[in-house]
Amino acid sequence: MKVILKADVKGVGKAGSVVDVSDGFGRNYLVPHGLAEDATPGNLQQLEGRKNAQKKRDEKLLSGARELALKLQSKPVVVRAKAGEQGKLFGAVTNAQISDALKTELGVEVDRHKIDLGEPIKSAGDHHCSVKLAQGVTATVTVRVVGG
């Protein structure tokens, strides 16, 4: 019996895949529990339509992320922090501060968890950090720390 899985089933397959299972397993477990549906021509056509729609959404999201990456890389973001005479900061610049600076200066809202500093920023000057925007799309942002 061929079925289309609606959810991931361990040992059988992932959601959206068409698999061949025994008749009893399909009729007595998968279909009644809402984990699968029969692989009729109409259901297969609906599955194909859902896959195409998801593919278009993913492409749109990816192109938007690429445009955002170019915008983020275009100019440095200025973060003000208290510093001593030698340019050494009192504390460190955090992801949240960089996220706030991106929002105020470029008008781009980025989740602070997606900003990777690599190592803490503890001195004034230009530093680089990466921002994960989408799967496979990262932007390198220049953070200009100004002592104040």
Image: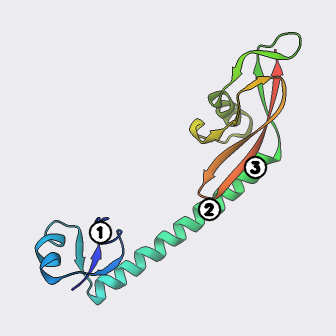
Classed neighbour count for the residue bearing mark 1: other residues with Cα under 10 Å, few (<14), some (14–19), many (≥20): few
Residue denoted by label 1: 11
Q: Secondary structure at mark 1?
A: loop
Q: Secondary structure at mark 3?
A: helix
Task: Give percent across and percent down for residue 98.
Answer: 69, 32
Residue 62 disc label: 2
Classed neighbour count for the residue bearing mark 3: other residues with Cα under 10 Å, few (<14), some (14–19), many (≥20): some
Residue denoted by label 3: 71
How many angstroms separate mark 2 from mark 3 (CA)? 14 Å
Q: Which one is in front in this view, the residue at disc 1 or the one at disc 3?
A: 1
Q: What amino acid does circle 1 point to? A: Gly
Residue at left offset 70%, top offset 21% = 92
Task: Please say if the residues under marks 1 and 3 sit with CB atoms less than 8 Å apart.
Answer: no
Q: What amino acid does circle 2 point to? A: Leu
How many angstroms separate mark 1 from mark 3 (CA)? 44 Å
Relative to 58, 3 lies left or right: left
Instruction: Locate the N terminus by quadrant.
Output: bottom left
The residue nearer to you, when weighing 31 against 109, is: 31
Residue 93 disc label: none
Badge 2 or badge 1: first in the primary sequence: 1
Badge 1 or badge 3: first in the primary sequence: 1
Direction front: furthest residue: 11
How many angstroms separate mark 2 from mark 1 (CA)? 31 Å
The residue nearer to you, when weighing 20 against 98, is: 20
Q: Which one is in front in this view, the residue at disc 2 or the one at disc 3?
A: 2
Q: What amino acid does circle 3 point to? A: Lys
Residue at left offset 29%, top offset 86% = 42
Relative to 125, 18 lies left or right: left
Residue at left offset 62%, top offset 29% = 96
Task: Give percent across and percent down for residue 28.
Answer: 10, 74
